[in-house]
Protein backbone atom coordinates (compact mmCIF):
# COMPACT_ATOMS: atom_id res chain seq x y z
CA UNK A 1 0.00 0.00 0.00
CA UNK A 2 1.42 3.36 -1.06
CA UNK A 3 0.31 6.71 0.31
CA UNK A 4 0.85 9.97 -1.53
CA UNK A 5 2.09 12.86 0.57
CA UNK A 6 -0.81 15.18 1.33
CA UNK A 7 -0.27 18.65 -0.14
CA UNK A 8 -0.56 21.69 2.07
CA UNK A 9 -3.51 23.98 1.46
CA UNK A 10 -2.68 26.02 -1.62
CA UNK A 11 -2.02 29.70 -0.97
CA UNK A 12 -2.78 31.51 -4.24
CA UNK A 13 -1.33 34.89 -3.21
CA UNK A 14 1.88 33.25 -2.00
CA UNK A 15 2.15 31.34 -5.29
CA UNK A 16 1.79 34.50 -7.38
CA UNK A 17 4.43 36.26 -5.27
CA UNK A 18 6.83 33.34 -5.66
CA UNK A 19 6.07 32.85 -9.35
CA UNK A 20 6.96 36.47 -10.08
CA UNK A 21 10.55 35.58 -9.21
CA UNK A 22 10.52 34.14 -12.72
CA UNK A 23 10.60 37.49 -14.51
CA UNK A 24 8.34 36.29 -17.32
CA UNK A 25 5.32 35.43 -15.19
CA UNK A 26 2.70 38.19 -15.43
CA UNK A 27 -0.68 36.75 -14.51
CA UNK A 28 -2.86 39.55 -15.87
CA UNK A 29 -1.08 39.57 -19.21
CA UNK A 30 -1.51 35.86 -19.81
CA UNK A 31 -5.09 35.82 -18.63
CA UNK A 32 -5.90 38.58 -21.13
CA UNK A 33 -3.99 36.77 -23.87
CA UNK A 34 -5.87 33.53 -23.24
CA UNK A 35 -9.17 35.43 -23.46
CA UNK A 36 -8.05 37.11 -26.69
CA UNK A 37 -7.24 33.73 -28.21
CA UNK A 38 -10.64 32.35 -27.27
CA UNK A 39 -12.40 35.34 -28.82
CA UNK A 40 -10.35 35.00 -32.02
CA UNK A 41 -10.45 31.24 -32.27
CA UNK A 42 -10.28 29.03 -35.33
CA UNK A 43 -12.74 26.18 -35.65
CA UNK A 44 -11.16 22.73 -35.49
CA UNK A 45 -11.73 20.35 -38.36
CA UNK A 46 -13.88 17.62 -36.84
CA UNK A 47 -12.59 14.90 -39.11
CA UNK A 48 -11.82 11.36 -38.05
CA UNK A 49 -8.16 10.47 -38.42
CA UNK A 50 -8.71 6.72 -38.46
CA UNK A 51 -5.95 5.90 -35.98
CA UNK A 52 -5.93 3.58 -32.95
CA UNK A 53 -3.72 4.66 -30.06
CA UNK A 54 -2.43 3.26 -26.82
CA UNK A 55 -1.82 6.27 -24.55
CA UNK A 56 0.28 6.00 -21.37
CA UNK A 57 0.99 8.81 -18.92
CA UNK A 58 2.10 9.51 -15.35
CA UNK A 59 2.86 5.93 -14.34
CA UNK A 60 5.25 7.03 -11.54
CA UNK A 61 6.20 3.40 -10.82
CA UNK A 62 2.69 1.90 -11.00
CA UNK A 63 3.73 -0.69 -13.58
CA UNK A 64 6.84 -1.65 -11.60
CA UNK A 65 4.85 -2.24 -8.40
CA UNK A 66 1.93 -3.92 -10.16
CA UNK A 67 3.63 -6.01 -12.83
CA UNK A 68 0.41 -7.41 -14.29
CA UNK A 69 -1.21 -3.98 -14.92
CA UNK A 70 0.35 -3.35 -18.34
CA UNK A 71 0.10 -6.96 -19.63
CA UNK A 72 -3.57 -7.16 -18.62
CA UNK A 73 -4.28 -3.82 -20.28
CA UNK A 74 -2.51 -4.79 -23.51
CA UNK A 75 -4.39 -8.10 -23.62
CA UNK A 76 -7.63 -6.09 -23.66
CA UNK A 77 -6.51 -3.84 -26.52
CA UNK A 78 -7.30 -4.70 -30.15
CA UNK A 79 -4.74 -3.93 -32.83
CA UNK A 80 -3.24 -0.46 -32.58
CA UNK A 81 -1.22 1.93 -34.73
CA UNK A 82 0.88 3.85 -32.20
CA UNK A 83 1.72 3.95 -28.51
CA UNK A 84 1.97 7.48 -27.13
CA UNK A 85 3.93 8.16 -23.91
CA UNK A 86 2.97 11.52 -22.40
CA UNK A 87 5.67 11.74 -19.74
CA UNK A 88 6.32 11.06 -16.06
CA UNK A 89 7.13 7.45 -16.90
CA UNK A 90 9.28 5.79 -14.24
CA UNK A 91 12.43 4.14 -15.70
CA UNK A 92 11.30 0.70 -14.47
CA UNK A 93 7.91 1.25 -16.10
CA UNK A 94 9.59 2.30 -19.33
CA UNK A 95 11.65 -0.90 -19.44
CA UNK A 96 8.44 -2.91 -19.14
CA UNK A 97 6.79 -0.85 -21.89
CA UNK A 98 9.62 -1.31 -24.40
CA UNK A 99 9.69 -5.05 -23.69
CA UNK A 100 6.04 -5.31 -24.76
CA UNK A 101 5.65 -2.58 -27.40
CA UNK A 102 7.89 -2.17 -30.47
CA UNK A 103 9.98 1.00 -30.22
CA UNK A 104 9.18 1.98 -33.81
CA UNK A 105 5.53 2.35 -32.77
CA UNK A 106 6.25 4.65 -29.81
CA UNK A 107 5.91 8.44 -29.77
CA UNK A 108 7.02 10.11 -26.56
CA UNK A 109 7.37 13.47 -24.83
CA UNK A 110 9.03 14.19 -21.49
CA UNK A 111 7.05 15.00 -18.37
CA UNK A 112 8.18 17.32 -15.61
CA UNK A 113 9.43 14.36 -13.51
CA UNK A 114 11.39 12.69 -16.33
CA UNK A 115 15.15 12.69 -16.63
CA UNK A 116 16.29 14.54 -19.74
CA UNK A 117 17.92 11.49 -21.37
CA UNK A 118 15.42 8.86 -20.11
CA UNK A 119 13.87 7.91 -23.45
CA UNK A 120 17.03 8.27 -25.50
CA UNK A 121 18.73 5.67 -23.26
CA UNK A 122 16.06 3.21 -24.36
CA UNK A 123 16.55 4.09 -28.02
CA UNK A 124 13.38 6.20 -28.30
CA UNK A 125 13.61 9.67 -29.85
CA UNK A 126 11.72 12.25 -27.78
CA UNK A 127 9.54 14.42 -30.03
CA UNK A 128 9.08 17.70 -28.14
CA UNK A 129 9.19 20.66 -30.49
CA UNK A 130 8.86 18.42 -33.55
CA UNK A 131 6.07 17.16 -35.76
CA UNK A 132 5.76 13.55 -36.87
CA UNK A 133 3.55 12.22 -39.65
CA UNK A 134 1.85 8.84 -39.56
CA UNK A 135 -0.69 7.54 -42.10
CA UNK A 136 -1.51 11.06 -43.22
CA UNK A 137 -1.96 12.50 -39.70
CA UNK A 138 0.51 14.91 -38.11
CA UNK A 139 1.48 14.87 -34.42
CA UNK A 140 3.16 17.77 -32.59
CA UNK A 141 4.79 17.31 -29.19
CA UNK A 142 5.33 19.62 -26.20
CA UNK A 143 7.28 18.46 -23.14
CA UNK A 144 7.20 19.49 -19.49
CA UNK A 145 4.95 21.63 -17.34
CA UNK A 146 4.73 25.07 -15.79
CA UNK A 147 7.83 25.70 -13.63
CA UNK A 148 6.26 25.57 -10.20
CA UNK A 149 9.55 24.72 -8.45
CA UNK A 150 12.90 26.41 -8.75
CA UNK A 151 14.86 23.38 -9.88
CA UNK A 152 16.04 21.73 -13.08
CA UNK A 153 13.48 19.52 -14.78
CA UNK A 154 11.52 19.77 -18.05
CA UNK A 155 9.50 22.89 -17.19
CA UNK A 156 8.88 26.43 -18.38
CA UNK A 157 7.74 29.84 -17.30
CA UNK A 158 4.68 31.08 -19.18
CA UNK A 159 6.87 33.33 -21.32
CA UNK A 160 9.20 30.43 -22.17
CA UNK A 161 6.22 28.27 -23.14
CA UNK A 162 5.25 30.84 -25.79
CA UNK A 163 8.74 30.66 -27.29
CA UNK A 164 8.77 26.88 -27.03
CA UNK A 165 5.82 26.61 -29.42
CA UNK A 166 6.54 29.70 -31.52
CA UNK A 167 7.99 27.80 -34.49
CA UNK A 168 5.65 24.83 -34.34
CA UNK A 169 3.18 24.56 -37.18
CA UNK A 170 -0.31 23.18 -37.56
CA UNK A 171 -0.85 19.54 -36.53
CA UNK A 172 -3.83 17.20 -36.38
CA UNK A 173 -2.92 15.99 -32.89
CA UNK A 174 -1.15 18.00 -30.19
CA UNK A 175 0.58 15.77 -27.62
CA UNK A 176 1.58 17.53 -24.40
CA UNK A 177 2.38 16.62 -20.84
CA UNK A 178 0.74 19.68 -19.31
CA UNK A 179 -2.69 21.18 -20.00
CA UNK A 180 -3.82 24.57 -21.34
CA UNK A 181 -3.27 27.59 -19.09
CA UNK A 182 -6.13 28.34 -16.69
CA UNK A 183 -5.62 31.09 -14.12
CA UNK A 184 -8.45 29.68 -12.00
CA UNK A 185 -6.59 26.46 -11.17
CA UNK A 186 -6.12 26.20 -7.39
CA UNK A 187 -2.60 24.76 -7.40
CA UNK A 188 0.62 25.92 -8.99
CA UNK A 189 1.67 22.53 -10.36
CA UNK A 190 -1.39 22.23 -12.60
CA UNK A 191 -1.91 25.80 -13.74
CA UNK A 192 -1.05 24.84 -17.34
CA UNK A 193 0.92 26.61 -20.08
CA UNK A 194 -0.18 29.59 -22.14
CA UNK A 195 1.95 28.33 -25.06
CA UNK A 196 -0.33 25.31 -25.31
CA UNK A 197 -3.37 27.61 -25.26
CA UNK A 198 -1.92 29.70 -28.08
CA UNK A 199 -1.23 26.66 -30.24
CA UNK A 200 -4.74 25.27 -29.79
CA UNK A 201 -6.53 28.53 -30.56
CA UNK A 202 -4.18 29.40 -33.43
CA UNK A 203 -4.12 26.07 -35.23
CA UNK A 204 -7.21 24.26 -33.92
CA UNK A 205 -5.87 20.67 -33.89
CA UNK A 206 -8.46 17.92 -34.09
CA UNK A 207 -7.19 16.47 -30.79
CA UNK A 208 -5.22 17.66 -27.77
CA UNK A 209 -4.05 14.67 -25.72
CA UNK A 210 -2.22 15.26 -22.43
CA UNK A 211 -1.51 13.88 -18.96
CA UNK A 212 -0.08 15.55 -15.83
CA UNK A 213 -3.38 16.02 -13.96
CA UNK A 214 -3.72 12.38 -12.80
CA UNK A 215 -7.25 12.39 -14.19
CA UNK A 216 -9.02 10.69 -17.08
CA UNK A 217 -11.63 12.69 -18.99
CA UNK A 218 -12.62 13.92 -22.43
CA UNK A 219 -14.25 17.20 -23.44
CA UNK A 220 -14.49 19.67 -26.31
CA UNK A 221 -12.86 23.10 -26.28
CA UNK A 222 -14.98 25.98 -27.48
CA UNK A 223 -13.05 26.09 -30.76
CA UNK A 224 -13.97 22.47 -31.57
CA UNK A 225 -10.70 20.77 -30.58
CA UNK A 226 -11.27 17.59 -28.59
CA UNK A 227 -9.31 17.31 -25.35
CA UNK A 228 -8.36 13.96 -23.85
CA UNK A 229 -6.63 13.77 -20.47
CA UNK A 230 -5.08 10.36 -19.71
CA UNK A 231 -3.93 8.85 -16.45
CA UNK A 232 -1.94 5.56 -16.56
CA UNK A 233 -3.11 3.80 -19.73
CA UNK A 234 -6.01 4.07 -22.16
CA UNK A 235 -6.98 2.92 -25.64
CA UNK A 236 -8.28 5.56 -28.06
CA UNK A 237 -9.67 5.64 -31.56
CA UNK A 238 -9.27 9.07 -33.15
Image: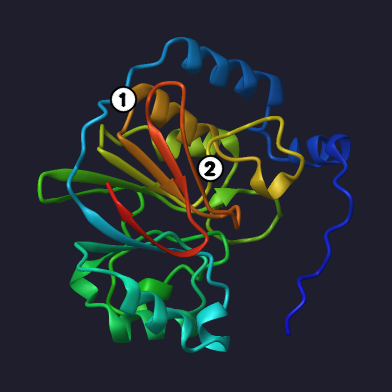
Q: Position of residue 228 (x, y in %)?
A: 44, 45
**First in sequence: mark 2 or mark 1?**
1
Q: Is residue 2 above or below residue 180?
A: below
Residue name at image x 46 percent, y 22 percent: 222
Residue at (67, 32) in percent of width and height: 25
Image quadrant assignment for residue 214: bottom right
User: Gap in Å between the C-alphas at discs 2 and 1?
Assistant: 18 Å
**Quadrant assignment, res 186:** top right
In the image: residue 131, left or right of residue 21:
left
Q: Nearer the viewer, residue 66 or 60?
A: 66
Image coordinates for residue 145, horizontal then vertical, percent: 56, 50
Q: How many marks?
A: 2
Image vertical order of residue 170 relative to residue 95, above or below: above
Residue 144 falls left or right of residue 3: left
151 or 51, which lies in front? 51
Is residue 37 shown above or below 146? above
Q: Judge whether 184 appears above or below 71 on screen.
A: above
Q: Nearer the viewer, residue 7 or 18?
A: 7
- In the rendering, which numbered label is found on residue 179? 2
Kind of element beneath mark 1: loop
Q: In this view of the protein, which residue sits in the foreground, 191 or 195? A: 191
**Image quadrant containing the N terminus:** bottom right
Where residue 11 appears, as percent x and y from the top left, is 88, 42
Q: Position of residue 14 (x, y in %)?
A: 87, 40
Numbered circle sitting on residue 44? 1
Q: Please name the colour scheme applied to the rendered image.
A: rainbow
* Tags 2 and 1 touching, CB below 8 Å: no
Relative placement, left or right, of 118 versus 132 is right
Pointer 1 local density, CA inside 10 Å: few below 14, some 14–19, many at least 20: many
Amino acid sequence: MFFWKKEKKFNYDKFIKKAKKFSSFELERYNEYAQYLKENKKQAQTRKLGLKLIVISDTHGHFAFSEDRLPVFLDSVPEYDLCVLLGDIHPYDLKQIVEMIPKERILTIRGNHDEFELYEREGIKEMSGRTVSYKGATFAGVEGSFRYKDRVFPSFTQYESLYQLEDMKRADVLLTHDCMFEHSKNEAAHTGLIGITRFIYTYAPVWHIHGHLHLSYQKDYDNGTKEKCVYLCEYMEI
